[in-house]
Image (spheres, rainbow, N blue to C red):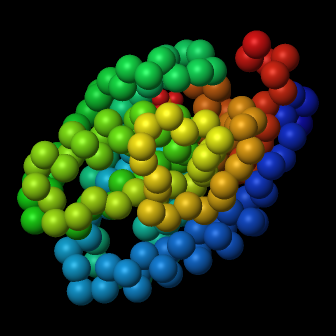
Amino acid sequence: MAYLDECTTLISAERIAERVAQIGKQITEDYAGKELIVACVLKGGFMFCADLVRQISMPLKLDFISASSYGSGSTSTGNVRIFKDLEMDIKGKDLLLVEDIVDSGTTIKTLRDMLLARDPASIKVCALLDKPDRRKADIEADYVCFAIPDEFVVGYGLDYDSRYRNLPDVMVLAPSEYL
Ligand code: PRP
């Protein structure tokens, strides 16, 4: 496809599906008997979360929160804006935040700290991708599908300037496209 000339595949859709099934099974075991609320962090988490919840074989409730720290550039502004809050009351509930990527960690730490103040029974983080080399905030995801090197990735929900979210694979975007 001509519009993909600037991308190379890092993680194929097949590998993603396999790993998401493993993590879904693990989450099912870990939360057995609990009242789980899965919170999809929009926008980037939409595709991962849609696949993940279908691999969790237990009753759960699904909610959405929308946050952004990137604006239209390729580096985080470090300033997290909440565009849409959760609708559910999480007091006493077990909350699982589902993110596409933990990079500096600023977004997920800001969300976790904000939501901890609502007195949930627990908060854990499930991330499709982890870039440990880029971490600034003191936070680690509890479930990680793939740890990746410090490359600019798009696809499977991740964007550059709102494009590429629809790609089924996680791909590396050539620096010429965003520098
Ligand atoms: C991206 C991504 C994570 C966050 C990770 O969101 O979806 O939420 O950045 O970066 P961090 O660990 O350095 O905070 P973005 O702000 O681009 O919003 P989006 O999900 O709507 O694309």
Quadrant of the drawing holding the C terminus: top right
For residue 84, what is the image quadrant? top left
Q: Going 13% across and 46% down the picture, which residue do you hit?
A: 117
- Relative height, residue 129 to residue 134 (above, below): below
Residue 17, given in percent of the width and then of the height, sits at 66, 67
Which residue does the image show at 55% across and 61% down from the upper left?
144
Where residue 162 appears, as percent x and y from the top left, is: 58, 25
Camera sees residue 38? yes
In this rendering, the answer to whether 22 lies above or below 65 is: below
Residue in view at x 84 percent, y 17 percent: 176
Instruction: Count all numbered tags in the image, as a single digit.
Output: 0
The answer to whether residue 179 is left or right of residue 138 is right
Q: Decide which of 69, 87 is in the foreground and name it.
A: 69
Location of the N terminus by quadrant is top right
Image position of 174 (left or right of 109): right
In this orientation, does residue 42 appear?
A: no
Q: Position of residue 35 (x, y in %)?
A: 20, 74
Q: Quadrant of residue 113?
A: top left
Please name whichever residue, 150 or 100, is drawn nearer the observer in this view of the structure: 150
- Residue at horizontal 29%, vertical 46%? 112
Q: Foreground: 101 or 163?
A: 101
User: Residue 177 placed where, x, y %?
Assistant: 79, 18
Q: Is residue 126 left or right of residue 122?
A: right
Q: Is residue 141 above or below residue 101?
A: below
Q: Is residue 78 shown above or below 131? A: above
User: Along the horizontal axis of the image, is 175 left or right of 147?
Assistant: right
